[in-house]
Image (cartoon, rainbow, N blue to C red):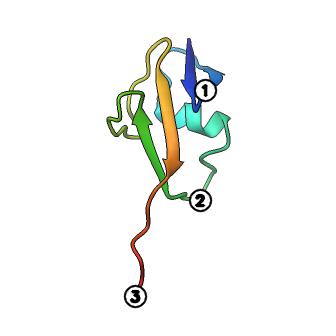
Amino acid sequence: MRVFVNGAPVDLLPGMKVRHALIQLGFLTQGKILPLRVQDEYGNLLGLDGAVHEGMRIVVTQSETPNSS
């Protein structure tokens, strides 16, 4: 199945999750947590273990970090 992450096509096998699409494009790496906000095309937040479907559009942005004042 093909999904899109920030407009880039990613081919996944059935049963793969949001996490696998992000790993393929380098947004996630083994042992490193990046401050990312993952949403669908409608602005709904997605979990890394969320299911994907054919043609799904995922948007990844940097998460806003609070000021440390």
Residue 69 marker: 3
| Element type at mark 1 | loop
* Vertical order, 27 against 10 (above or below): below
- The amino acid at mark 2 is Lys
* Vertical order, 6 against 54 (above or below): below
Name the residue beneath numbered marker 2: 32
Name the residue beneath numbered marker 1: 7
Q: Nearer the viewer, residue 54 or 41?
A: 41
* Vertical order, 68 against 63 (above or below): below
Residue at 34% from the left image edge and 40% from the top image edge: 45
Residue at 64% from the left image edge and 21% from the top image edge: 9
| Element type at mark 2 | loop
**Disc 1: CA contacts within 10 A as few (<14), some (14-19) or many (>=20):** few
Q: Nearer the viewer, residue 24 or 4?
A: 4
Q: x, y (%) of residue 8?
A: 65, 26
Q: x, y (%) of residue 59?
A: 49, 35
- The amino acid at mark 3 is Ser
Q: x, y (%) of residue 29?
A: 63, 50
Q: Earlier in the sequence, mark 2 or mark 1?
A: 1
Q: Earlier in the sequence, mark 3 or mark 2?
A: 2
Image quarter for residue 68? Answer: bottom left
Q: Earlier in the sequence, mark 1 or mark 3?
A: 1
Q: CA distance from mark 2 to mark 1?
A: 24 Å
Q: CA distance from mark 3 to mark 2?
A: 26 Å
Residue 48 marker: none
Viewer-nearest of discs 3 and 2: 3
45 sits left or right of 24 in the view: left
